[in-house]
Amino acid sequence: MQTRRMFAVLLLPLMLVMLSGHRSEAMLVRAGEDVFVSQEESLSEDLALFAETISVDGYVDADVIAFSRSLVIAGVINHDLQGGAETIDLTGQVGDDFRAGGRYVDVRGPVGDDAIVFCERFTLGSSGRVGGEARVWCSEAFFQGDVDGNLRASCARAEVHGRVGGDLAVEAASIKISGPVDGNADLKGAAIVLLPGCVITGDLVYSSPNEIEIQEGARIEGAVERRTVEIETDRKETVEELLAGLGAVWVFLKVAFFVGQIIVGLILVGLFRKATVHSSMTFSGHIWKSLGIGIIFTCCAVIASLILPFTIIGLPLAIMLVCFSLIIWYLASIVVGLAIGGLMVGAFKVRSTGRLIGGLILGLLILRALSFVPILGFLIQLFVILAGMGAILIAMKTRPAEVPTGDAGP
């Protein structure tokens, strides 16, 4: 019990930092094949949504986290929206920040503050608006609506037809601009065209192997500077584009891995609740023992997988051992995430499905936030994997305590 309290106290400051931007004290979790927030609903709790299709038509006076295949926001989210989906269609309103990752992201409604998007194709419609700064990494980006702050885009093709209230920085193979830019413009591309209606109030700096095309009706009020393109520019740009592409892929894979962890965790809580809770409680109650077992198992598994293939019947056993190790490795973070979040929300005392799911999501979010800390993040991830694996192995050898199957009140 003393270890658990110490564990919770150490993580409490981090939780407070993560939740400092949240306006409500509770989190409402909805999961299923299709999840809806109807037009008649008005919610004041932070909302976490996980489903095949998600539709928000009502009013949410809190932050929203949503992961699905199709995400449609036609209602009002008064604070932050963080989501991941194959297609995201925002026709409603987001009062604060909008952070999203997916394949197709269409914003046709107002965003109160900043927008950060990773996707294949991004569209800011003529009825859409970003009240703060917009940062977009994608293959194609089309800005028809206004961006009140700075606009930064890195993609293969970019078109800016709306107004940019701050500075404009675009790096793309093809760049077309027809809207006014109230600040400076920094453009990098192979083909840059300023269309009629484009008025750059500040300075223009561009880098391109070709001369910029300034059509009649376009105007630059500040200075124009063309950066020198060296002989090896093409090769450097190719390497930079490759690195940028690999970076985008890496970010997408991390988001997909995180979403997959949440989905698998929900399945484990729903179908294997007793074993999952037992593993998490084993970790929180026997942290150092779990770490030791995890280290021993990892060392033995590596040595055995290298030796077994050289024996007569060892190759199938080596393959089975590797597969088993990978499964345990993947589940380790889920078990530790549930242990951390479960202690925070009291899920192991009440053990309602809602609190278990909320604790799982909160714990995984904490682990994801810690992973971004340089050096320390890697060490924490290594600790989580080893200790989580050890907890699972210990739990497999011990009998789980009785876990109520019915939902208890919060």
Image: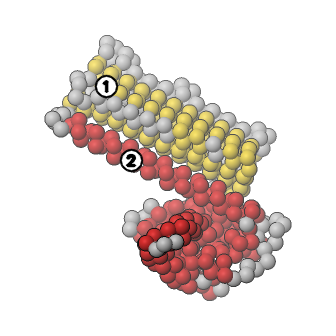
Q: Where residue 353 sits: x, y (%)?
A: 76, 63
- Amino acid type at circle 2 is Leu
**291 or 133: nearer the eye?**
291
Q: Which mark is residue 228?
A: none
Q: Quadrant of residue 202?
A: top left
- Amino acid type at circle 1 is Ile
Secondary structure under the numbered disc 2 in the rendered image: helix
- Residue at image coords 54%, 67%: 316
Q: Are marks 2 and 1 in contact (CB under 8 Å)?
A: no
C-alpha distance separating marks 2 and 1: 24 Å
* Residue 140 makes an appearance in the image: yes
**160 or 129: nearer the eye?**
160
Q: Which mark is residue 192?
A: 1
Quadrant location of the C terminus? bottom right
Secondary structure under the numbered disc 1 in the rendered image: strand
* Mark 2: few/some/many CA within 10 Å (<14, 14-19, 20+): few
Residue lying farthest bottom?
Answer: 2
Mark 2 highlights which residue? 246
Quadrant location of the N terminus? bottom right
Q: Where residue 383 sits: x, y (%)?
A: 49, 74
Residue lying farthest front?
Answer: 312
**328 or 402: nearer the eye?**
328
